Amino acid sequence: MTIQTVSTNKSHGGVQGVYRHASAETKTDMTFSVYVPPHADGAKLPVVWYLSGLTCTHANVTEKGEFRRACAELGLIFVAPDTSPRGADVPSDANNAYDFGLGAGFYVDATQEPFAKNYRMWSYVTDELPKLVAANFPVDAKRQSVMGHSMGGHGALTVALRNPHRYRAASAFAPIVAPSQVPWGTKALGGYLGPNKDAWRAHDTVALIEDGAKYSGFLVDYGDADNFLTEQLRPELLQAACSKANIPLTLRRQPGYDHSYYFISTFMSDHLHWHAARLTA
Amino acid sequence: MTIQTVSTNKSHGGVQGVYRHASAETKTDMTFSVYVPPHADGAKLPVVWYLSGLTCTHANVTEKGEFRRACAELGLIFVAPDTSPRGADVPSDANNAYDFGLGAGFYVDATQEPFAKNYRMWSYVTDELPKLVAANFPVDAKRQSVMGHSMGGHGALTVALRNPHRYRAASAFAPIVAPSQVPWGTKALGGYLGPNKDAWRAHDTVALIEDGAKYSGFLVDYGDADNFLTEQLRPELLQAACSKANIPLTLRRQPGYDHSYYFISTFMSDHLHWHAARLTA
């Protein structure tokens, strides 16, 4: 479990690093970023996982997320994985669309060919990368949480619902909450998991809740000027499911905000405080 | 004086915009960004000018500068111009080097051919763009200040020293302070202004101070892990000049920080508070 350092930069008193490793899950080199805040020698820190959206790499949130000041104040490690395997040998969308294949792993382990070999982002973000990070950074593995944006919000909510004891907090910016019911999701889940929709339910937040998954509560922000709101995101479906299942949901409609990092960076500090309150309790 | 809107995004309660206009000074289209914080209807707000460094456009600080939260709290408009004229017809470095020509205007009005026609960044940032911004945004032109990074720190300090009554505050991240004495500066000033070094003194912070320019005080941060520190930046020359001229200088050596936006974003809030204290006094 060795990692190669791509870059390190001091920032907000800590170190923002970018690292690369050979992934056993994806059979490719994978790049990820880790921010380690200032801390006492020997301290073990809680870690927040950030799962990114369609077309993104680790770099988008690392450069534009405005998370370091709050992470430094709150003592949080912040890890940002890539969104898919990468490389010339990795199969992708037949038409090079942005919403499937490269940059669009949807945080599932694909069962369909030709994707099954490389597209193992579920196991990558929930198993391989956490072990790698724990082995190389001062992480307290008992204090983890997860957040994400759009496709990564889908990832964060499903990861939390299926591992409620490992992730003490979960939040999302403009998440896809019911992929089985929207165009992005049906294309992705169909392509990676095949036509049997029963297999999709383990990767659909609303379906997981309908099927009995429980969680201590979610914080979800979305902008009412988000172009993807009514067709792809559909937060009202999450609200209905959480309400019926008695899962506490703090759902905030942010007037005038869109789907961009200008939106995410505005509310990042709120989310990190939400996580910190649950990670340090 | 019309401007074209390239994009607007709500962020931190205000609006981050990117705009384009046909510049009379550079004879090219120029792109710049403006952040307008939340404010009362009819209010006129102070404006902070941010001048960027080599290779940058408006976009670097706009995406990575982490200035919006503080600008929103403090009620500051934040404007980021480009660093040179752009376009296929604009002459540049003969060898396409990064430190002259495109992305490297050095905030001077060139007198040498073939640069004199387009490279008029001094007049652009001190005259044309301020008028354009004042005509299109809720600016209180009596309350302006200027900051910058590296080449843009050079720009900010020279602009302030030559217009001390217009710019109420000035600060810089890792500025070039004595271009006449360092490789980046001698190449640029020689190329744009010609071999007569007398003409360079009006664009050299240390020389301006030696020649009697006064200012109310500067805030300057630099990182001691900055690769350009000893050869190009040389903050000790600024310290000596300010000391001799009794210009108050808050010069901070930041341990472990480099030349990147990871450094700038760390101390951006400090700088904006410095500016706000002087703009709202």
Image (tube, coloured by chain):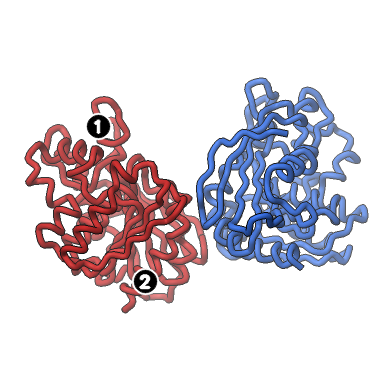
Chain colours: A blue, B red
Q: Looking at the rendering, which quadrant does residue B212 occupy? A: bottom left
Q: Chain of mark 2?
A: B
- In this view, the residue farthest toward the top is A89
Earlier residue among tags 1 and 2 = 1
| Image location of residue A261, percent across then percent down | 56, 52
Q: Which residue is mark 1?
A: B92
Kind of residue indicated by mark 2: Ala
Give the crowd class for mark 2: few <14, some 14-19, many >=20 residues within 10 Å: many
Q: Is residue B30 visible?
A: no
Residue at (63% x, 64% y) in the render:
A74
Query: Is A174 in front, or is A75?
Result: A75
Q: Position of residue A73 (x, y in %)?
A: 59, 64
The location of residue B66, given as percent across then percent down, is 48, 57
Q: Is residue A97 left or right of residue B83?
A: right
Q: Inspect the image, locate mark 1, and give the three-letter code of the amino acid beneath it.
A: Ser
Circles 1 and 2 on the same chain: yes
